[in-house]
Amino acid sequence: MNLTNHTTKSKKNKYLTEIDRYKIEVLKKQGISNVDIAKALDKSDRTIRREIARGTIKILNSDLSERTEYCADVAQAKYRENAVNKGPGLKIGADHELAEYIENKIINEDYSPDAVIGEIKEQGIQFKTTICTKTVYNYIDKDIFLNLNNKHLLIKRNKPKRKYKQIRKVSITNTASRRIDERPEEVNNRESIGHWEMDCVVSGRGSKAVLLVLTERKSRKNLIYKMKDKTQKSVGKVLDKLERKHQNKFEKIFKSITMDNGCEFVNQNLIEKSVLTKKNRTTAYYAHPYSSWERGSNENANKIIRRFIPKGSDISLFTEKEIRRIEHWINNYPRKILKYRSAIKVYDIEMAS
């Protein structure tokens, strides 16, 4: 699953092994084009072009004329010496395992440089060298890595930003609801587990399908559910299903839920009332109109989801398996705000205490 393609499909591995380089040498001698070599090895065209450029050498013919030829041995040697040859004093030096680890995490698992370095420290992973986030960014800018460049970084992509004006439909009659001002300080300060924010991610025009996203405030754990439409009935179905799943533990897991004044959420009784006991199962709080920052964790989660499901997408076309993969990626991603632990790890620790 890769964010750069805005899809849940696995991205081509841009990693080249020594065996791959020998395959390239054989295929080039057979006259195979770079594009076909890329397809044969399941690599990107750019990776193959860069690799061939680095491994091409001049060979002197018997008649003293020159020809160019890709040499796998030369390419592999350059790869091994790449970090050192880029300049003296590189911290990464000859620690090829660290370089390969960083490349794999960013290219294939969509990590940011900060997330990679943070996870290495948090999990105590040992390499010959230790480097900081800033150093990784510097190496990427200077093209130190063989396969990794700025195009793999979400925040550095030269992609034009979409300009649009979004009007959020809110209920102007939801005046009897419990306002966010009544929320206890322990909830506001994220002191205890079990307090959630809730919102919907919508499809583009032509599709009513949406995602209901619940974000736990302290751990940032996310629960994502596909609904056929953005109605009170659909929201109630998801919460009822969760209650049936967790039974009497529901009240402990979902102590409170904070949401906006969207028409799909205004039925406070539907949110709070237990489908099993008819008593209150949770406490609902409503943010002020047009104040999305009051549900900051939820909004951030929605932005991450949009990396996988861009605005305008038809959510009904995404399978349950794909939705679960998105949820799994978000919940297992190391977060700086959590000291580079994942949301699922923090959530499990808090719930067990």
Image (cartoon, grey):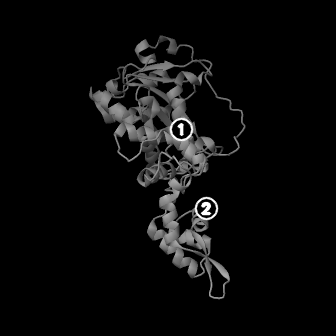
Residue 257, quarter of the rendered image: top left
Which amino acid does the dot numbered 2 rest on? Arg
Q: Residue at x 57, y 43 (%)?
A: 138
Q: Residue at x 50, y 61 (%)?
A: 79
Seen in the picture, residue 257 relative to 184 is either above or below; the reply is: below
Mark 1–mark 2 Cα distance, whole angstroms, equals: 26 Å
Residue 319 position, x and y percent, is 48, 51
Q: Is residue 216 left or right of residue 47?
A: left
Residue, far bottom: 63
Residue 107 position, x and y percent, is 51, 52
Seen in the picture, residue 130 relative to 67 is either above or below; the reply is: above
Residue 125: which numbered mark, if any? none
Residue 34 position, x and y percent, is 61, 71
Do the numbered discs 1 and 2 sit on residues whose CB atoms are within 8 Å? no
> Mark 1 highlights which residue?
134
In the rendered image, the quadrant that contains the C terminus is top left
> Mark 2 highlights which residue?
46
Q: Within 10 angstroms of label 1, few (less than 14), some, or many (20 or more) residues?
A: few
Which residue is nearer to you in this view: 19 or 296?
19
Which residue is nearer to you in this view: 90 or 350?
90
Camera sees residue 347? yes
Q: Tag 2's secondary structure? A: helix
Q: Residue at x 52, y 19 (%)?
A: 286
Q: Is residue 296 left or right of residue 189?
A: right
Camera sees residue 179? no
Labels in figure, total: 2
Q: Nearer the viewer, mark 1 or mark 2?
A: 1
Q: Tag 1's secondary structure? A: helix
Residue 306 position, x and y percent, is 57, 41
